[in-house]
Image (cartoon, helix red, strand yellow):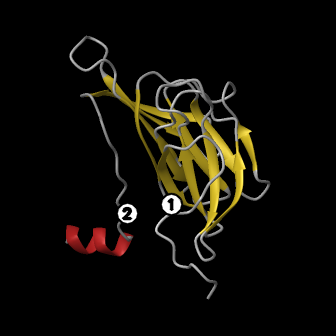
Amino acid sequence: MESGLPRASIPRSGPGNAGPAVVGPDGNLYVVSAGPPLGGGEGRLSIIDPVRNVEVASFAGIGPVAPSWVASDGGERVLIVSPAGGLMAFNTRLRRLSLPFGSGVPLEFPSGLVTDAAGRTYVLQRGTCGSPISGRVRVFGTTLIEQQQINGVACPIAGAMAELPAERIFTAAQ
């Protein structure tokens, strides 16, 4: 074991304000940093090696507004959602943003991001909560092309995915 390990925190490059994180398909931790708290900076995506407790890479290109949600698609992408940048994608194998800020899928009032084992992506959009514009869930396929919308959702603020094996569903139905 190296001297000084384990650490209570891991130094990262960039502007700070670490936020959401997810374990990627490669076993690394992907951490989104929002930048300065009063704006004026660019958010970053850091790749952290959890075994060595070090940042192995850091990437700009996720925009000036705080990205709020991050998820792994179970393949080779980490997905990032922010109010200004929409749905963005980072390829973990190529280590580059395949949908950077400015090229992401536009979203209105995003409020959550989840993925499932089939590689689908679900983006919650809260609407304006209390006005005629209701919330919805947008469902994207593995190519990030929208497949479906679930409309009329009353102001969704968070999402979670639970998957049950088919044999448990059929057993419970009998």
Q: Which mark is residue 68?
A: none
Residue at the spot 55% in from the left edge and 52% down from the top edge: 31
Whether residue 35 sits left or right of residue 104 in the image: it is left
The label on residue 117 is 1
**Disc 1 crowd, CA 10 A, few/some/many (<14, 14-19, 20+):** few
> In terms of secondary structure, where does tag 2 sit?
loop
Q: Percent x, y for residue 127?
A: 34, 21
Residue type indicated by callout 1:
Ala
Check disc 2 and report the residue beneath it: 163
Is 85 placed above or below 165 here? above
Please tell me whether mark 1 sits on a helix, a strand or a loop.
loop
Residue at point 34% right, 75% down? 167
Q: Position of residue 155 (x, y in %)?
A: 26, 28
Residue in the image at 30% along x and 36% along y: 157
Question: What distance separates the C-alpha of mark 2 from that of mark 1?
Answer: 8 Å
In the rendered image, the residue lying farthest to the front is: 3
Q: Is residue 31 above or below residue 169?
A: above
